[in-house]
Image: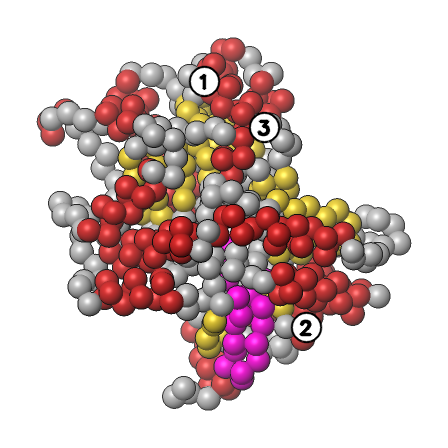
Amino acid sequence: MSDSLEELRRLDKAHLWHPFTQMQDWCSSEEDPLIIASGKGAMLTDVKGNQYFDGNSSIWTNIHGHRHPKIDAAIRDQLSEIAHCSALGFSNQPAIQLGEKLVNLFPAGSLTRVFFSDDGSTAVECACKMAVQYRQLKGEARPHFVAFGGAYHGDTMGAASLGGIGVFRERFASGGYPACHLDDIDGLESMAAEDAETVNAVIVEPLIQGAAGMQVWPQGMLRRLREWCDANGAFLILDEVMTGFGRTGQMFACHHEAIVPDFICLAKGLTGGYLPLAATLTTEEVYEAFLGSYEEMTTFFYGHSYCANPLGCAAALGSLKVFEDEKVIDSLGPKINSLKEALASVENPHWGDVRQVGMIVGIDLLDHQTGDALNWRKETGARVCRAARKYGLLTRPVGDTLTLMPPLCSSVDQIKSAVTALDHATRDLLS
């Protein structure tokens, strides 16, 4: 390393602007920034040589661990050919192969078309713009989207307008899509017929909402959503940016209820957590509505410079090969059960509701004397997560909800140790 640790920290505070971070606190904090230097498997190492368990999979992205030999090799092999070429008027072999692999993860003939972009927000934007243009091309007056309270679908203007968390949406409420936010499936099923006829699409994070604090949807909700959309002529968009690629115990959350959406949005774990890449999958029916002569102006005029980037597609192919070769989904049962048992064994007076879906966990902190929620202004969740570092755990809360989302490669012992670290850190700070 050419720069000293002190110099790196100084330069960070002098020039970087971190996401979801109050930079005044960051730059004036007595606790200097933790700088990650390397990773191996489920472990991260900082520039001082301290090791930590990657308890939130490097913000919900890493799947098979850091420096997995198969994914490393896939990227190196692709680097020997080309790092990037345009998908506008050209194609590349990794993108073609990945498209085939992705559609084959769903029932034959269901989701047949893949549009690549860069991240979760753009995957959602792509689905929504396709839905809007489809209705225009078909001459259908269906301007409205239905989303849910607590939802998070990204930070670009359109995706943010569909979110149900005020801090991400309210400042930018003048832009985006016309959306109705409901509390639950009952609100949708009780919608008046004349209102239902104006609904273009319903969008949801299936099984569990991430940024809402790992809030779990009731069992059967996805099937009821599919039935409502079918009965009312609306599209169903599933945002599986967080839940996709094994997080819930199945390859995709929608597999738990055996339903297929009209659009599915994928990112985060798509490349195993290596490179930015997103995909929006849709049906042949949607795709065919955009076909026509150039003069008819039915083209989907949307795209990014790095759409279908060969390196990202190669990494994603490497990740899918790991799923196949190591039978990752089949191996998750014992790990999920161990996580459940570890959580159940903790008797922490500061822990309220504990929620788990597969390898995803949310733990609400509460006032142990009153049972009430904590004062969010005190950032207790963030302070507990910082305290967990001395027990070898790195994770990040959602407000005062502690979260765990370990890489799927994590061992049973690592999973148990992560739960213990959160228990100890909570007691250290609040007892």
Sort mark 3 into few (<14), some (14-19) or many (20+) by Cα contacts within 10 Å. Answer: some
Identify the residue at image location x=40%, y=50%.
Answer: 324
Please tell me whether mark 1 sits on a helix, a strand or a loop: helix
The alpha-carbon separation of the residues under discs 3 and 1 comes to 14 Å
Q: Which residue does the numbered mark 3 point to in the structure image?
A: 221
Q: Which residue does the numbered mark 2 point to in the structure image?
A: 391
Query: Tag 1: residue type?
Result: Asp
The boundaries of the magenta stretch are 42-61
On whether residue 23 falls in the magenta region, the answer is no
Direction from residue 404 to residue 374 in the image, left or right: right
The percent coordinates of residue 235 (x first, y second) are 41, 25
Instruction: Say which quadrant the C terminus sits in.
Output: bottom right
Please tell me whether mark 2 sits on a helix, a strand or a loop: helix
* Residue 255 in sight here: yes
The percent coordinates of residue 245 (x first, y second) are 46, 47
Q: Is residue 391 above or below residue 63?
A: below
Please tell me whether mark 3 sits on a helix, a strand or a loop: helix
In the image, 271 versus 331, the foreground residue is: 331
The alpha-carbon separation of the residues under discs 3 and 2 comes to 38 Å
On whether residue 52 falls in the magenta region, the answer is yes
Q: Which mark is residue 230?
A: 1
The alpha-carbon separation of the residues under discs 1 and 2 comes to 50 Å
